[in-house]
Amino acid sequence: MPELPEVQTVLSGVIQKLGSKQLLGLECYYPGTVIDKHDLRDQAFPAKLRQGYRRGKYMILELASGFALIIHLRMTGKLVWDEDDGEPKAHERAAIPVEGGFRLRFIDIRTFGKITLLPTLQVQEALPKLGAEPLQLGFGAAYLSDRIGKSKRPIKTALLDQSVVAGLGNIYACEILYEAGIDPFKPCNELSGDDFDRIVAATKLILAQALMHNGTSISDFRRVDDKTGGFQNFLKVYQQESCPQGHEVQKVKQAGRSTYLCPICQK
């Protein structure tokens, strides 16, 4: 599933491509991909983009018409900017026609992704409860300690809780904990103040590096120009055989997910 760096990379590309162009509509080719409970499309379009922003793994496109799109890529969704030739592509579940003969295609092999159309004023209540944005000032050691410091949950499980930290997923949780030198199975209530400092510092570092390389393409992730990201070339433990220190990386199951760690570097 695309995580914070991938979602932000796609969003930045969408904003750049749309510019001041009119969005002409919202087409749906697969039942359930577009959620438009009150049949708002005729009121919402055509309209220009007023602003776009990300919250966790959700993209929000606010339109000048007073409506907004919440886009959740989920497992295999991607947005691809293309010329409008009038025909849906393979696995295209929805599309936004754009003036000038362009099309923003929503490609989703596994069909879990969603595009929700609603009034802008209803966006916040439509989103799930989300925790702090890890690249913003509100995310610090004090915040993290306050939220999870008394929990017996393993630290990696806590970092994947979107109500604690918005936007992290399995890849970056593994990389962050390696960077911080912390065992993913360590209970939160056994973490020291220094541990929380290192986790926060590692989170900001790893996410910034991933954004610089346009995200991580392990399987399905593509940028809006349908090119891959590049951070997969800099992963230190995720799907690696050895860590940068030459120690063997272990792959173990944790809460139904694969956790990658170095038992020597991470304590």
Image (tube, rainbow, N blue to C red):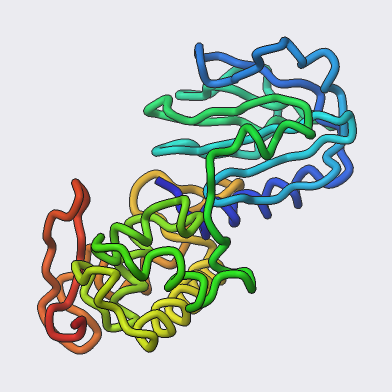
Where residue 198 sits in the image (x, y, percent)? 40, 84
- Quadrant of the frame with the N terminus: top left
Name the one closer to the observer, 236 or 198. 198
Question: Height in image: 82 above or below 90?
Answer: below
Q: Is residue 228 left or right of residue 245?
A: right
Q: Residue at x 25, y 72 (%)?
A: 237
Residue 120 occupies quadrant: top right
Q: Residue at x 77, y 21 (%)?
A: 25
Where residue 46 sits in the image (x, y, percent)? 86, 23
Question: Height in image: 57 above or below 197?
Answer: above
Question: Height in image: 260 above or below 265?
Answer: above
Q: Residue at x 20, y 66 (%)?
A: 260
Total number of numbered discs in the rendering: 0
- Quadrant of the frame with the C terminus: bottom left
Q: Is residue 99 left or right of residue 175?
A: right
Where residue 50 sits in the image (x, y, percent)? 85, 43
Name the one closer to the observer, 125 or 77. 125
Q: Residue at x 73, y 40 (%)?
A: 61
Residue 43 occupies quadrant: top right
Residue 203 occupies quadrant: bottom left
Name the one closer to the observer, 13 or 114. 114
Where residue 153 sits in the image (x, y, percent)? 25, 60
Q: Residue furthest front?
A: 150
